[in-house]
Image: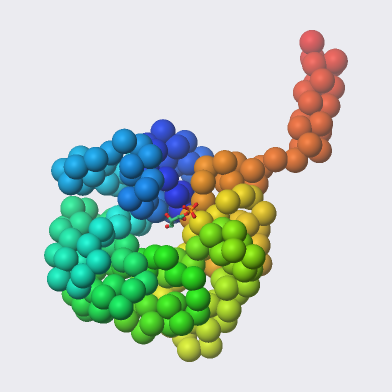
Amino acid sequence: MKFFIDTANLDQIREAQDLGILDGVTTNPSLMAKEGIKGKENIKNHYLKICEIVDGDVSAEVISTDYDGMITEGQDLAALHPQIVVKVPAIKEGIKAIKFLSSIGIKTNCTLVFNQGQALLAAKAGATYVSPFIGRLDDTSTDGIELISKIVEMFNFYQFETQVLAASIRHTMHIIQCVEAGADVATCPLSAILGLLKHPLTDIGLKQFLDDYKKVNG
Ligand code: E4P
């Protein structure tokens, strides 16, 4: 499973990259706003800074909701850097835009996916990734991980090449559940990734090893 980090914070992206396990980055307009990045040029420059830090795919989201706007914006974003993946919402105009952008070789990430039908249409349109939002589904008493499993099963059955990118991950256990569900990618906050390392027996064991070493070696 690939690991993406879900943030526009450059320090966190660097920290995850330094860990040596990072395969890409996802951003969205809310995450950019959280970092205080505003204005088209500043936003584009920020995407370029992210591309300089990581080697893999970097999702950059369109803000247009009409077909013409989405494809103009999508082409502009894709022209910024070869690592850019154009993130498009799972709405009617978005599916049409994904079809066009895919047909001219631009990678796409269909975002705000909350059911199998949206994932099916995105895959039929040729999306590189679909992003089911598991945390936001969990927030509405709906099992987000179950949706990941169903989409993985559907894509495997019909042999779609579209990758399932589990998004809206809130904690470490979501990552483990995504592994069990067969997600291709999980985009996670840094805290959830680092949470994978937490175990008291590791800390206790390490302390004991170091104490025993000191007893003999001083
Ligand atoms: C995915 O690409 C989105 O940026 C993100 O995962 C949304 O997560 P949230 O529900 O925590 O805002």
In the displayed image of the protein, which residue is found farthest to the bottom?
Answer: 158
Nearest the eye: 171 or 93: 93
Q: Quadrant of the C terminus?
A: top right
At x 81% / y 31%, what residue is drawn?
Answer: 204
Q: In the figure, 209 relative to 155: above or below?
A: above
Nearest the eye: 50 or 99: 99
Residue 120 as seen in the image, left or right of residue 201: left
Residue 8 in the image: state x and y as whole percent. Answer: 37, 43
In the displayed image of the protein, which residue is found farthest to the top?
Answer: 218
Residue 115 as seen in the image, left or right of residue 89: right
Picture quarter containing residue 183?
bottom right
Q: In the figure, 161 relative to 50: above or below?
A: below
Residue 175 in the image: state x and y as whole percent. Answer: 61, 56
Residue 42 in the image: state x and y as whole percent. Answer: 20, 40
At x 53% / y 84%, what residue is drawn?
Answer: 154
Nearest the eye: 4 or 135: 135
Residue 80 as seen in the image, left or right of residue 135: left
Nearest the eye: 14 or 110: 110
Q: Quadrant of the N terminus?
A: bottom right
